[in-house]
Amino acid sequence: MGRAMTNLVAALVAGVVLTGCAATHGLDGDLTDDWRGLPPAGAFTPAAGVCQVADFTPTVSPAGYEPVGCDLPHRVETVHVGTFSVDRAAPPALGSAELRTAFADCDGRASGYVGDNWRAGRLRLAVALPTGPGWAAGSRWYRCDLTELTTVEAAARVVTRTGSLRDALKGPSALRLGCQRTGGDARARTLTPVDCRTPHDAEFVGVWAAPDRPYPTKDAEWAPLYTGCNTVLATYVGVPDDPILRFRSGVVVRPPGTGRWAVGDRGVRCYLWLTDRTVTASLKGAGPAGLPVRTR
């Protein structure tokens, strides 16, 4: 009985071995040469409507792309991803027509996304591009990124926030620029946000779109910015935009920096400035009674 079982097992093993040595139905015994090669990697394109934990970077590679839901803590929110139509060897450079066109698109998209001109809030818009290798691989996108800032003045820091910026400026919002205090500085070098019910001497009145000219460096080149902001001020308060306006209020202009100007940012933030008094309410729509002609 034991010898018979041994013979049966031996036969089965032999059958398995023989089966293994039988026809391979197309296999030639080389386990590598019949595998199809992997298809070439497609051009990487980031998504819109997502957020990034890391700070904004001017170029983005697949390795550094880690999108998260905007309900999680983040520092950047992508509001739109557009496509370049140019065929060039490298990504568009600072000051190029292509990059200026991309910024203009992002400008409008960002304002539509938040529900008002994004400059009316403590926000910064920037355009990210593919890396050089990414561009060479076929990526032709540009990414429109918004970040929340602690201030739009000097020494601004990026805020780690939770929640999307979509419709963030559609109504009243802690992000909105409003009443400000200059601190008595004769040139209003700094503006500090304050509650409009506390004494203050300045207030954000809106944004003026500067014409496409070189960045102002001389007094004569700065003059149009003051004229433009005076018009914005007059509309905001509800007073005549005439030569008497300068006797009602001063004006503070905050254009974008030279680098942003080169990209095509022409949005100038405008503030009214009371050099002779403080008030404890917003002057929006206050009219001539709220912004009387100064007597001294």
Image (cartoon, rainbow, N blue to C red):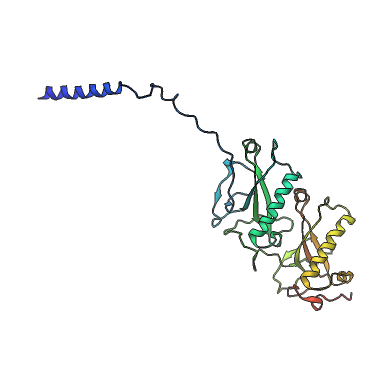
The quarter of the picture where residue 196 lies is bottom right
Residue 117 image offset from top left, x and y in percent: 70, 61
Q: Is residue 102 visible?
A: yes
14 above or below 200?
above
Query: Which residue: 82% across, 62% down?
Result: 228
266 displayed left or right of 1 = right
Residue 239 image offset from top left, x and y in percent: 82, 73
Quarter of the image where the N terminus is located: top left
Across the whole image, how many numbered discs are drawn on residues? 0
Query: Which residue: 80% across, 57% down?
Result: 210
Q: Nearer the viewer, residue 197 or 225?
A: 225
Query: Which residue: 56% across, 38% down?
Result: 42
Residue 127 image offset from top left, x and y in percent: 68, 49
Q: Nearer the viewer, residue 252 or 31?
A: 31
Quarter of the image where the C terminus is located: bottom right
Q: Is residue 188 visible?
A: no
Residue 271 image offset from top left, x and y in percent: 78, 65
220 above or below 32?
below
Q: Nearer the viewer, residue 110 or 251?
A: 110
288 above or below 33?
below
